[in-house]
Amino acid sequence: MIKCSLSQEELLSEIEKVRSQMNHLSRELQRTSAEMLELSTKLDKLLNAYQFNHMVQK
């Protein structure tokens, strides 16, 4: 089970922030770099939390 203390709006804001960071870094780093993998994992967790929260609210 995924638990997150952020609201849906805060999750969306954080998702966009991490996406932007990934887009910026992708111009400089390989997709398999440690930094990109770390951001990708963070984005996955945020997206999963957002989806879980959305399903629970229904």
Image: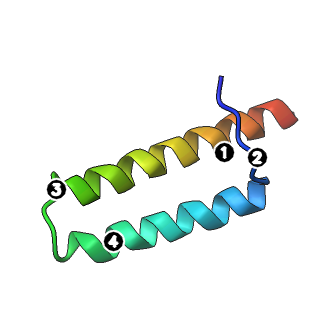
Q: Which residue is mark 3?
A: 33
Quarter containing the N terminus: top right
Question: What's the amino acid at mark 3?
Answer: Ser
Q: Which residue is mark 1?
A: 50
Work out whether mark 3 precedes mark 4 in sequence or the reverse, and give the earlier one.
Answer: 4
Question: What's the amino acid at mark 1?
Answer: Tyr
**31 left or right of 25 in image:** left
**Snapshot quadrant of residue 25:** bottom left
Residue 54 x/y as whole percent: 76, 40
Q: Which residue is mark 4?
A: 23
Residue 53 x/y as whole percent: 75, 39
4 vs 2, front mark:
2
1 vs 2, front mark:
2
Give the answer, above or below, for where 51 lies relative to 26: above
Number of other residues with Cα within 10 Å of mark 4, as a class: few under 14, some 14 to 19, many 20 or more: few
3 vs 1, front mark:
3
Q: CA distance from mark 4 to mark 2?
A: 26 Å
Q: Which residue is mark 2?
A: 5
Q: Residue furthest right?
A: 58
**Snapshot quadrant of residue 16:** bottom right
Work out whether mark 3 precedes mark 2 in sequence or the reverse, and give the earlier one.
Answer: 2
